[in-house]
Amino acid sequence: MLVGRIEIESDSARWFKSGAGTVLSRRQRCKRGFTITEMLIVVAVVGVIIAVAAPNLSSLYINNRLDTAANELIATLNFARSEAIRRGTTVSVESAAGRTDPNWTSGWKVFVVSSGEVLRFGQPQQHPVRLFNVSDTSLQVGYVSNGSRDELVTFVFVLCYDGALTGAGPKSRSRGVLVNPSGAVSLAAIGSDGRPLKPAKPLDGFVLTPILSCEPI
């Protein structure tokens, strides 16, 4: 019986030693790190992912910049319209550079025409986003007391990224903002060539034509 117990204990000891050796062996393998081949494979895979994702990330960034700038301008124009209705008088929006300047990149101001009271200033556009009034008529947007425009024409703004209407693809690098005679403000549709669309004629909102330039022609 004693011999049997000794044999059992010996078997247990051998099993323990074998198990401990297996655990130790696994730990040693975990500590050895990556081989050069494995590292090169990882670097290659990461490079492919970056090459595929980078153009999309760039386009996403540009679109976000343009959309943010367009929404800020639309909010300002709607504010001016609501103030004209609330105050019962004409409220206008013009370039911060002056009434006759079609370049609105430096910002804009909202003011009451009768008193000259300034209600709000718009922040300048951050480079390389530029904002221009490309309308065929007035250089300022005026709202009368009923919320309509003080001119029976569509006012047209264009926002461009780095001076270009479109990029490769074609991918749009611009946004158009339209103010129709009723005073309603809208984001211009984008044509198949990536350029924003405007009414072909000042009073015709049904026939659309692409905006041809980032600046007044």
Image (cartoon, rainbow, N blue to C red):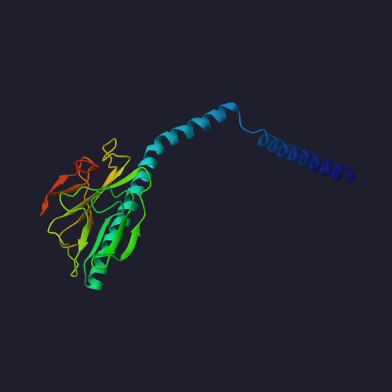
Residue 80 spot, x, y in % from top left = 27, 64
Please name the residue shown 37% across and 44% down the image.
Answer: 127
Please name the residue shown 85% across and 43% down the image.
Answer: 4
* 50 on left or right of 165: right
Please name the residue shown 29% across and 50% down the image.
Answer: 104
Nearer to us in this view, 87 or 97: 97
Q: Is residue 104 above or below residue 37?
A: below
Residue 49 spot, x, y in % from top left = 44, 36
> Is residue 184 at all visible to an observer of this figure?
no
Nearer to us in this view, 211 or 94: 94
Residue occupying the far front of the picture: 115
Q: Is residue 186 above or below residue 128?
A: below
From the image, which quarter does the C terminus lie in? top left
Residue occupying the far right of the picture: 2
Q: Is residue 186 above or below residue 212?
A: below
> Is residue 182 at all visible to an observer of this figure?
yes
Nearer to us in this view, 46 or 2: 46
